[in-house]
Image (spheres, rainbow, N blue to C red):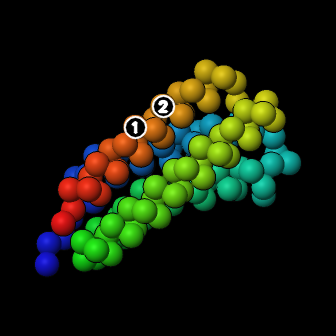
Amino acid sequence: MKRHNYKNLKIWKLGLEITNDISDLLETFPKHERYDLSSQLSRCSISIPSNIAEGSARTDKSFKHYLDVSLGSSFELGTQLLIAYHRKYINKKQLEQFEDKVEEFQKMTMSFQNKIT
């Protein structure tokens, strides 16, 4: 049974970059959001690379499931970023930069997922 070294996967590296970018962004959020939107953004961004890492130790069939979970978290992140934008916690440029990076992650992950037998 083949295992993937998650640290060598471009999708994992990009997911980790997104997680770190979100962590930096959350430093600027209002304190009253600490247990609401900030917490949700943090948890779903952390879920993106974490599920890739966890799934990489499983069978290919199971790994595909973990990639689905990671993708789901990336779509959740997109929604939460829109909420942050509408609450004026981030500006349009920041939103677009995050959306571009998240979309790149999604495309790469779906392509990778299709290559797994």
Q: Which mark is residue 104?
A: 1
Inter-mark Cα distance, 2 to 1: 6 Å
| Residue bearing the label numbered 2 | 100
**Left or right of residue 27: residue 21:** left
Residue 59 horizontal/vertical position (percent):
25, 77
Residue at the (78%, 55%) spot, across then down: 36
Q: Is disc 2 placed on a helix, strand or loop?
A: helix
Disc 2 and disc 1 in contact, CB within 8 angstroms: yes
Quarter of the image with the C terminus is: bottom left
Q: Residue furthest top?
A: 93
In the visual, does 111 lie left or right of 99?
A: left
In this rendering, the answer to whether 86 lies above or below 7 is above
Does residue 5 sit above or below 107 in this rendering?
A: below
Residue at point 59%, 39% (across, down) = 24
Q: Nearer the viewer, residue 87 or 19?
A: 87
Between 20 and 41, the one nearer to me in the picture: 41
In this image, 95 relative to 103: left or right?
A: right
Q: Quadrant of the N terminus?
A: bottom left
At label 2, the amino acid type is Asp
Q: Residues within 10 Å of mark 2 (few under 14, many from 20)?
A: few
The location of residue 41, given as percent across then percent down, is 64, 51
Residue 68 percent across, percent down from the top left:
43, 62
The residue carrying pointer 1 sits among few (fewer than 14), some (14 to 19) or many (20 or more) residues within 10 Å by Cα, namely few
For the point 42% across and 56% down, which residue is it? Answer: 49
Q: Position of residue 112 (x, y in %)?
A: 26, 52
Residue at 45% in and 59% down: 70
In the picture as drawn, the residue positioned furthest to the left comes out as 1
Where, by quadrant of the figure, is residue 44 drawn?
bottom right
Q: Is residue 33 left or right of residue 55?
A: right
What secondary structure is found at the residue carrying circle 1? helix
